[in-house]
Amino acid sequence: MAERIDIADLTAPHLTDAQKQMIAAAEAVPFFLEENAVLDAARQATGLSDFGSDDFVDRMRRLIDEWNGDTRAYAVKRHFLMRYLVRYATNRLLIHDTLKKHPEIHDEQIDRPIIVVGMPRSGTTHLLNLLGADTRLRSTPLWETYEPVRNPLEPDAPGGVDPRYARCAAQWEASRTANPLAAAMHPMEPDHFHEDLELMCADFASYNFEWIARSPKWRDFYLSTDQTPHYEYMKTCLKLLQWQDVQKGLPRKRWVTKCPQHLEQLPVLKAVFPDATVAITYRDPVEVIQSAITMIAYGERNFYPHIDTQGLLDYWSDRVETLLRACVRDRDVWPESQRIDVPFEQFMADDIAVVRQVRAKAGLPETGQANREIADFIASHPRGKHGQIVYNLERDFGITPAQLRKRFDFYFEAYPFLRRPSR
């Protein structure tokens, strides 16, 4: 039985000494994000200067302007965001340099990928990990999506470890120090399979930026912009990763990836990956929202003097509604021959059966080895091994589940196979 964790101080945090010291150290030195500082840091890290098309600069400026305008945030928040921006700019330099030197990468084919689509916190990660345990498929571990091309200027870490892997592991340990419940909320170990949209971030695109900082201006810009070029950029990055495998003597494999953003970009996803099989997960939106905003509120204790619970509730309730209305509108762009629907309760009741259904839809034969690999993954990754968070919407966010659920009547009506909770 998983330990139940009730975050009693979610809205009025009691900070650890380490958290207080981190905040104080950053506040002692005023810091704001600067475009040139980001680009110069990337150039210095790589020795490169060609970013390719400069259209990304406008998108980066939008983020910098909005994030600098967050006057509630501690300086440590901007330091945190600076690391993200520098990493993405560095990745862009390395990706573009590799593509220039090896134009044959563009000839790689991404053949019949399996793409998991669904709301955040709706079982997408678990389904991706189960499918990805099958070694016939290729997925993207966190360390590789964070840094898809190794910087040739960097030596191995101790023990001959890839410095990208070592850096990701160190970041995870630092995150667990800053947020002791991080593992219970959303494990992010280096080998953890991650979302494909991370690869778009070197193009300074995707809704991923909303997760690292609430960004309504960016949200509006993103939703008003055709995302096809950025999905094509992501596909090129998958080709690059596949090409790197071949250079190491590894076989080409079918990809299995996932991302919640695809819910509101289903036509774009279809245009860029026309031969994909998509598995769409469905869950009570209230369960999704309470999980997401509790996780974000807990992380914000390191970045803000006060937790804006009403702002989090409003932003992410609206964001999830936008995702779901787009899904209801566009789901059928994917024909049943390429789509499988995965209700959350059905998946939790028999996850192996769902994996078999997805593989069958994708034309991937059953094998004893694949089933053993998935069974081994389940045995080594028991659900709730880091504890189970207890959610209390009414206490922490001032709304009952039933009140919040009313705005999603359209979703339950569109998908009658979904069980609507009575509470």
Image: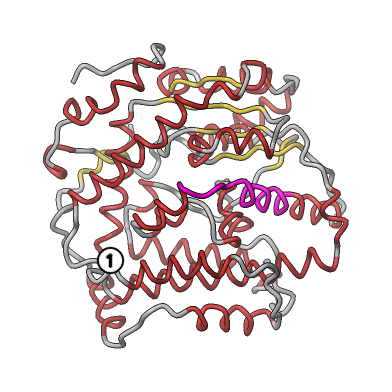
Query: For the point 23% across and 38% down, which residue is it?
Result: 391
Observer-nearest of 269 and 163: 269
Rendered-image quadrant of the N terminus: top left
Left or right position of 209 against 159 = left
* Position of residue 296 measured from the top left corner of the image (x, y, whole percent): 31, 52
Q: Is residue 197 above or below residue 12?
A: above
- Magenta-colored span: 223-238
- Residue furthest to the bottom in view is 29
235 in the magenta segment: yes
321 in the magenta segment: no
* Position of residue 322 measured from the top left corner of the image (x, y, whole percent): 38, 37
Residue behind mark 1: 302
Q: Secondary structure at mark 1?
A: helix
Query: For the point 30% across and 40% down, which residue is it?
Result: 318
Amino acid type, mark 1: Asn
For the stretch drawn in magenta, the main secondary structure is helix
Left or right position of 319 against 14 = right
Quadrant position of residue 62: bottom left
Rendered-image quadrant of the C terminus: top left
